């Protein structure tokens, strides 16, 4: 059942005093697919901007990824947006898009370079319509020999060293979640906010490479290997703390629940030993000694944790100031006490389905209106937006009849399987 996350805020704030976000009044046009651009505009929407999601007749890719319907990515990163379904290959579709850009503040897309040129969605195209437009293109690669090539999240991981060190059965593998896409979306938001603050017109044309995003994220590891090469005379990747510091990682309790321990320093080790009443061992007091006796230390920690049920263990660790948390499966995350505190997530209904979606964790800047608004159906706001752009009734009918713009099919089932009961 939908219940309470925003209840307290709703009771306290009247409609007149409701926070509309620091970007209230700004209009953002998104031509996004998958994650990078939709994630960027999701953040801007949470900050108060009106986001108009321009989608092709088949819909944005993430609308059809799970059982023929919307995926978790679509549900998480598109709530509260408006959907305008346009065929930009038709003259009337292009006409609608041009009028949209004329009145917008920001355009963000992650189209391929060739697609943006074909559809007339380059900076020059948009700037000719609106000299004040802030334009942000998230590409596979920035300037360089690969600038016209296509890249995706796993390609960025592979090309910037992340994948080489993340192996499953010896095979370089992607991390799992598309964090590089989301980082690129964050960098896009930073760029847009900077451009809004700047009076320099040359700062309004922003190009952001997913590859270059990956390089920046990997800076710690890239400099670490440079340091080791100069110290040791050979390249050596800096290992993760989890694999180089004993006592740092996941351990299973007596009830089958897992705890993750952060044990970086000698002080961390002392606190852990005090918490679980482990006698101090003279030859394990320093990190250097514990590293030398890694297998021995791992056995001590593993056996100590295995004696306790999680709740008892958590109380002991917390009392002694040990850094830890339970390793949670995704279905349990939002049931945790910390996640249940007000302001962490919002609830919304999408057709007959119910969802809880985490909010941007900067409550003082985030809007308090429209957080419980579901993602739009494909073309849900087409009629409304066409009217707002000044097209009269006859023009709207002509545009819709030509299928240059398409309204929502409210009767279409979202997923191929019916909602599970229970």
Image: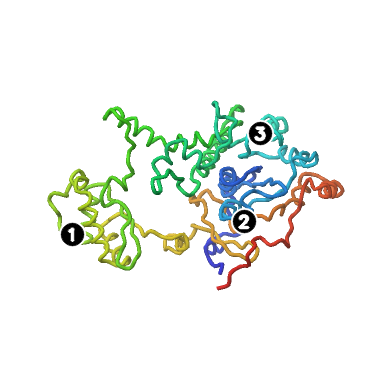
| Residue 260 appears in the rendering | yes
| Residue 341 appears in the rendering | no
* Left or right: 407 as drawn, with respect to 68: right
Crowd rating for badge 1 (residues with CA inside 10 Å; few <14, some 14–19, many 20+):
some
Q: Position of residue 377 (x, y in %)?
A: 68, 56
Label 1 vs 3, first from the N-terminus: 3
Foreground tag (1 vs 2): 2
Badge 3 marks a residue whose secondary structure is helix
Using the image as rendered, state which of residue 279 and residue 340 is in the foreground. 279
**Quadrant of residue 89 in the image?**
top right
How many numbered markers are drawn?
3
CA separation, marks 3 and 2? 27 Å
Residue 86: which numbered mark, if any?
none
Residue at the far left in the pictured view: 282
For the residues bearing labels 1 and 2, Cβ distance under 8 angstroms: no
Using the image as rendered, state which of residue 333 and residue 196 is in the foreground. 333
* Left or right: 312 as drawn, with respect to 47: left
Q: Residue at x 71, y 38 (%)?
A: 101
Residue 114: which numbered mark, if any?
3
Q: Position of residue 115 (x, y in %)?
A: 67, 36
Q: Position of residue 36 (x, y in %)?
A: 56, 43
Q: Residue at x 25, y 50 (%)?
A: 246
Label 1 vs 2, first from the N-terminus: 2
Task: Name the residue tied to disc 1.
Answer: 278
Q: Residue at x 34, y 37 (%)?
A: 237
Label 3 vs 2, first from the N-terminus: 2
Residue 70: which numbered mark, if any?
2
* Left or right: 389 as drawn, with respect to 32: right
CA separation, marks 1 and 3? 63 Å
């Amino acid at each position: 059942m939908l219940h309470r996350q925003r209840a307290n805020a709703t009771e306290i704030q009247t409609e007149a005093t409701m926070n509309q976000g620091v970007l209230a009044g700004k209009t953002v046009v998104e031509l996004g697919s998958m994650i990078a651009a939709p994630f960027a505009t999701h953040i801007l929407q949470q900050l108060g901007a009106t986001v108009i999601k321009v989608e092709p007749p088949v819909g944005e890719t993430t609308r059809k990824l799970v059982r023929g319907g919307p995926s978790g990515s679509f549900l998480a990163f598109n709530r509260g947006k408006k959907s305008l379904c346009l065929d930009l290959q038709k003259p009337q579709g292009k006409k609608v898009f041009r009028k949209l850009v004329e009145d917008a503040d920001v355009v963000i897309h992650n189209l391929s370079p060739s697609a943006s040129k074909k559809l007339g969605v380059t900076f020059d195209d948009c700037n000719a319509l609106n000299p004040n437009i802030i334009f942000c293109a998230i590409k596979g690669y920035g300037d360089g020999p690969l600038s016209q090539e296509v890249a995706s999240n796993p390609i960025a991981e592979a090309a910037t060293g992340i994948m080489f060190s993340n192996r499953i059965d010896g095979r370089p593998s992607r991390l799992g979640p598309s964090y590089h896409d989301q980082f690129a979306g964050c960098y896009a938001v930073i760029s847009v906010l900077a451009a809004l603050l700047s009076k320099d017109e040359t700062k309004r044309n922003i190009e952001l490479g997913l590859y270059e995003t990956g390089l920046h994220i990997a800076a710690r590891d890239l400099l670490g290997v440079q340091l080791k090469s100069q110290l040791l005379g050979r390249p050596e990747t800096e290992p993760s703390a989890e694999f180089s510091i004993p006592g740092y990682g996941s351990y299973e309790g007596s009830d089958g629940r897992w705890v993750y321990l952060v044990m970086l320093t000698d002080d961390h080790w002392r606190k852990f030993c005090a918490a679980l009443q482990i006698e101090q061992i003279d030859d394990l007091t320093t990190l250097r000694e514990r590293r030398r006796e890694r297998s021995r230390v791992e056995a001590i920690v593993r056996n100590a944790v295995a004696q306790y049920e999680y709740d008892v263990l958590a109380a002991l660790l917390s009392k002694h100031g040990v850094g830890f948390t339970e390793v949670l499966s995704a279905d349990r995350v939002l049931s945790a006490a910390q996640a249940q505190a007000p302001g962490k997530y919002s609830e919304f209904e999408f057709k007959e389905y119910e969802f809880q979606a985490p909010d941007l964790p900067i409550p003082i800047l985030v809007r308090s209106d429209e957080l419980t608004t579901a993602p739009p159906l494909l073309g849900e706001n087409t009629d409304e937006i066409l009217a707002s752009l000044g097209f009269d009734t006859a023009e709207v009918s002509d545009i819709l009849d030509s299928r240059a713009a398409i309204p929502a099919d409210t009767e279409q089932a979202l997923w191929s399987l019916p909602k599970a009961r229970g």
